[in-house]
Amino acid sequence: MTRQRLWQIEMKAAGRCAICGKIRGTDGTRTHCRAHADAQSRWTAPRTRAIYRGDPSKKKANNALNFAIKKGTTSRPTACSQCGLNDTKINGHHHDYAQPLEVTWLCYVCHRKSHIDAMIKADRP
């Protein structure tokens, strides 16, 4: 584990920003202080919009899955279904956006690998 990752884990446990160490929001859902949270959203929002603009069914499928998780009809497992890693957030990977609740639960590394493999199979850059 890298020194930076250890710092982030330590700061998260202490209720502080993972970047600068300042005290973050009191609601317990923030990982960064207000300044870094705003900067992060300015960076990620355009990328997210661009991804969904290309295929609106992705957004519908993601929203349906997130709603099912919040409602309690679907639960997010604690371990990756491919590698078994359980100390990170697990993401749902849709194979077919027409079936939004049928997902494979993968860690970040396995999720990226599945997208790269799909791009190679489709022979796209």
Image: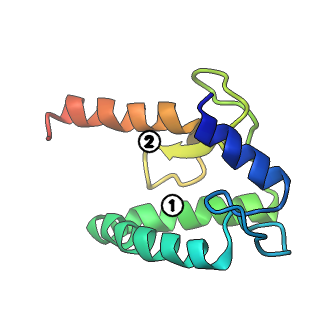
Q: Which mark is residue 120?
A: none
Give the side of residue 124 with respect to residue 38, left or right: left
Q: Which mark is residue 95?
A: 2
Residue 98 seen in render: yes
| Viewport quadrant of the N terminus | top right
Residue 64 spot, x, y in % from top left: 60, 64
Q: Callout 1: 10 Å neighbours few (<14), some, many (20+)?
A: some
Residue 74 seen in render: no
Give the residue drawn at x 48%, y 37%.
111
SS label for mark 1: helix
Question: Which picture quadrant has residue 53?
Answer: bottom left
Please tell me which residue lies in front, 104 or 102: 104
Cα distance in 3D space between marks 2 and 1: 11 Å
Give the residue drawn at x 57%, y 67%.
63
37 over 9 or under it: above or below: below
Residue at image mark 1: 61
The mark that comes first in sequence, 2 or 1, is 1
- Check disc 1 and give the amino acid type: Ala
Please tell me which residue lies in front, 53 or 57: 53
Residue 58 spot, x, y in % from top left: 42, 61
Give the residue drawn at x 76%, y 53%.
11
SS label for mark 2: loop
Question: Which picture quadrant has residue 48?
Answer: bottom left
